[in-house]
Amino acid sequence: MKKSLIVLLLVLSTIMFTFALKPVKAYDIHVEYPVFSGLENPVVEVFINTYIENEVNRYTEDFESFVAESWTSPSGAPFQLHITFDVKYSKTPFISVVLYIYRFEGGAHGITNVISLNFDTTSGKLLRLKDIFEAGFDYESVIKSEILSKIEETPENFFEEAVGCVKNDKLDDRNFALTEDGLIIIFEEYELAPRYFGILEFKIPLEKLEIKEGFKISFVR
């Protein structure tokens, strides 16, 4: 029986003002990230929560360094860092969480980046895409074929070079997440399509994949 895990929400929100000889600059930081509890191994639980917190802190500290070295944004609007998350799966033996990092550093608009974190709840190992498949399974061909078929359904929504980008993509460096009914492959803004389409998530049905026995998830009926 798969064990459900408890997910807590930690929210940090600050609005800071820095005074200098030039006009006042302001920045806004709002951070949300999950804290997991209920894992069978408390050492693994601490490791996973600490890893997620450190990732959030890394982006926060980088943003604060940027603000410290910058004057006001050209538009006059405050610099912004907003970090939110989505827990895609959180039952033994797998945790899959996606962090969405929005940064506004002046200009017409900000940009959102994504980082996916996938953990084996037994060992605490941070998993790469190749780690979840049975040995010998040609997952790259299957996944790319599924993505390309989705692009072909509405080619007008994608850049002309989108097909080539997918064919040449190194999937093991790609953000991904597992849900109860599919594997999600994530592409950032501007990678395959104009910005107004946002972050693109392509879901590959689990029945088309050979997931390792230890990571198999019951299909949604």
Image (cartoon, grey):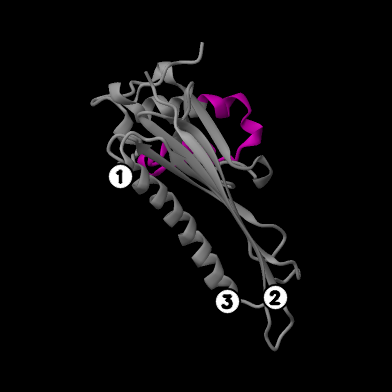
Which portion, as a residue range, is magenta?
Answer: 149-175
The percent coordinates of residue 149 (x first, y second) are 52, 24
Q: Give the residue number, with chain letter if any, for mark 1.
A: 43
The percent coordinates of residue 175 (x first, y second) are 45, 41
Number of other residues with Cα within 10 Å of mark 1, as a class: few under 14, some 14 to 19, many 20 or more: few
Q: Say the numbered circle drawn on residue 25.
A: 2
Q: Give the residue number, with chain letter if any, for mark 3.
A: 68
> Is 134 placed above or below 36 here?
above
Q: CA distance from mark 3 to mark 1?
A: 37 Å
Q: Secondary structure at mark 1?
A: helix
Q: CA distance from mark 2 to mark 1?
A: 42 Å
Residue at 51% of width from left, 10% of height from top?
Answer: 221
Q: Secondary structure at mark 3?
A: helix
Mark 2 belongs to which amino acid? Answer: Lys
**Is residue 49 visible from the viewing direction of this image?**
yes
Q: Are marks 3 and 2 in contact (CB under 8 Å)?
A: no
> Is 162 placed above or below 132 here?
below
**Is residue 163 visible from the viewing direction of this image?**
no
Position of residue 107 in the picture relative to residue 117 (left or right): right
> Is 95 placed above or below 212 here?
below
Mark 1 belongs to which amino acid? Answer: Val
Name the dominant secondary structure of the magenta segment. helix
Magenta stretch contains residue 68: no
Q: Residue furthest left?
A: 135
Residue at 50% of width from left, 60% of height from top?
Answer: 59
Q: Secondary structure at mark 2?
A: strand
Q: Are marks 3 and 1 in contact (CB under 8 Å)?
A: no
Ranked by sequence position, the earlier of labels 3 and 1 is 1
Ranked by sequence position, the earlier of labels 2 and 1 is 2
